[in-house]
Image: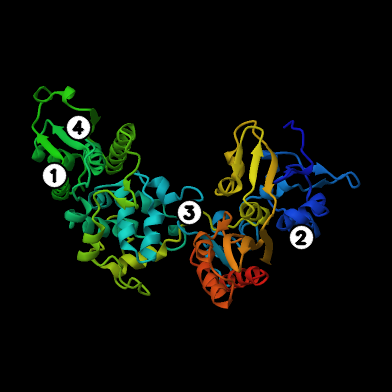
Amino acid sequence: MEQTLNCCISENEDIITVGAGVTLSVMAESELLKREAKPLFDAAVMLTGRGKEALEDTAVDTAMEASEDKDTGVKAPTICDEIFQNVNCGFTGSAVPCIKEGGTECHALWEKGCAFSVMGGKAVGTTSCVSACPVGMEIPAVLEQLRDKDGLEARRIIMKYNPMPSVTCRMCGQCEAACIRSKHDRSVGISGVFQAMGDDIAAHPEIFYAVPSGDSGKRIAVKGCGPAGVAAAFYLRKLGNRVWVFEQRSEEELTKELKKMIPDFPETEFSGYIRALSGMGVVFRFGADSGEWDENEFDRLAEGAYMSCSAPEFLREVRRGYETANRINLDFGLKSYMKPGKTFIGFDWEAFAGRMDQRIAPISSGLGDRDCGTDYGTDCGTDWEAVSTEAVRCLNCGCYGVNRSCTRAILTALDAQIRTNKRSRRALDFFSVTDPAGQLEPGEVIQTFEIPKSGDYTSGYLEFGHGSGVAFAYFVQHGKIRDARIVYSGIAPVPVRMIETEAFLRGKEINSGTMEQAAALVCREVILTGDGRDQADEMKKLLVRSLEGKEI
């Protein structure tokens, strides 16, 4: 790729500009970086001292050619090279056979003493179970909430995508078939877990299908009571629209037809959802010919008549109904399913807390005789101990390798901007995926990194392993932390910003109590796999060290 390399480091009143073609050795000699962006300077010194082995699996071909050292003729690694390192696993390519290379075990997960981690609740790419799910359910996020024993939030996420979970999760097991844990022992019993929660949702229509609190003033006709029609009616009604569903067949004919096409189709439960939606104000007109109602009486018409011939197709129609409702709600200016204060419209949180225990039962050490993952749709019933145990088995497995580019974490902590020949993006956003280079358009290359001058901030980078460490930036005034940015590298596929810990530190005095509490928070924001205790201890120690050097 023909590109003119920017190999300069410059400054203006507020910004340090580092060209993408600047080598690490040049950065390690820059007094400007040492003074105004010290973490980046320290990283360059550290990486230069290690030599080129510090840059394993680089992907520089996606951006720019590395610069050539004038003295040796050897290509010298640039800052662009360093940030484009691929996610890597210490076992891949080693003498120990791993699942990826034809082995039978994932040593990153199961080998004692190896501390890898994955993101907790933050997407770093689409996991195999989500890709397989016809409705695109955030399966890892639901299971994460169950791991945290927040059953309320788990159910809310489900209802965000699928208003009929007890029906659909009895018919479909594609998520379990795609679960990569099956390569080690057995799939997580996702169908059973979601079925149990779906039954729970269906049993409490007064909570999960509550009448919406507002009225949009819009009238909407849904043509057809197939899965898309039912889903569209639910999400349209949620935002206070007045909804009518017109179906030529009788309810009995409709359910028998679905049963004929899908043998596992639960007729009574589908009827139960129709009753639940009726209770929240949706009007169903069965046996209604098209001539019996006038489309002109309505603000919008939604199509929901298509009848599926398989369980996956049924779910895809649910998704189509959700997407149709979303488009209509957006057209009406109803941009969110959330009210001010982040209350799900029509979801009676107080009623939920009053009638049910939103905290899932304590996690047990094993499933015992229950095996929710053997057959798709196996009924876990209300055995929340079994449900919780299965949730723990899911590790949000987007990638078990880590990215060891300390520069990514540093640029994120310094709130840098990454400027290409077409646009500018925050480092925080650019590095939020495992393959940042994949975000570049054809012909788009990184030109410069723009870093705010340190000013009143004290920043640094502390390392506890090859590429694993913490980048930080603190603004301390009158003995209190006014702002904090804390980003760990080498513990996940992407840099991990400690949002909860940062929020805790703001406004706090720096003392032993503050440091201990902050250290206890850092490991709550990632999921450590394998024997992660040593890594957790190091993460805590580094945070304390970063705070100890601050003047009160």
Q: CA distance from mark 4 to mark 1?
A: 16 Å
> Which amino acid is tagged 2?
Met
Which residue, given by chain and number where applicable, does mark 4 sit on? 219
Which of the two labelled residues, at mark 4 and mark 1, occupies the earlier sequence position?
Answer: 4
Q: Is residue 70 left or right of residue 337?
A: right
- 4 vs 1, front mark: 4
Q: Residues within 10 Å of mark 4 (few under 14, many from 20)?
A: some
| Circles 1 and 3: CB atoms closer than 8 Å | no
To which residue does mark 3 refer? 122
The front one of 260 and 228 is: 228
Q: Position of residue 12 (x, y in %)?
A: 74, 43
Q: Earlier in the sequence, mark 4 or mark 2?
A: 2
Q: Quadrant of the C terminus?
A: bottom right
Q: Amino acid at mark 3?
A: Lys
For the residue pair 192 and 375, the one nearer the viewer reads as 192
How far is mark 1 from mark 2, CA to CA?
Answer: 65 Å
Residue under numbered circle 2: 46
Q: Which residue is mark 1?
A: 278
Q: Secondary structure at mark 4?
A: strand
* Residues at marks 1 and 3, CA–CA distance in whole angstroms: 36 Å
User: Could you tell me which secondary element the residue under label 3 belongs to?
Assistant: loop
Q: Under tag 2, what secondary structure?
A: helix
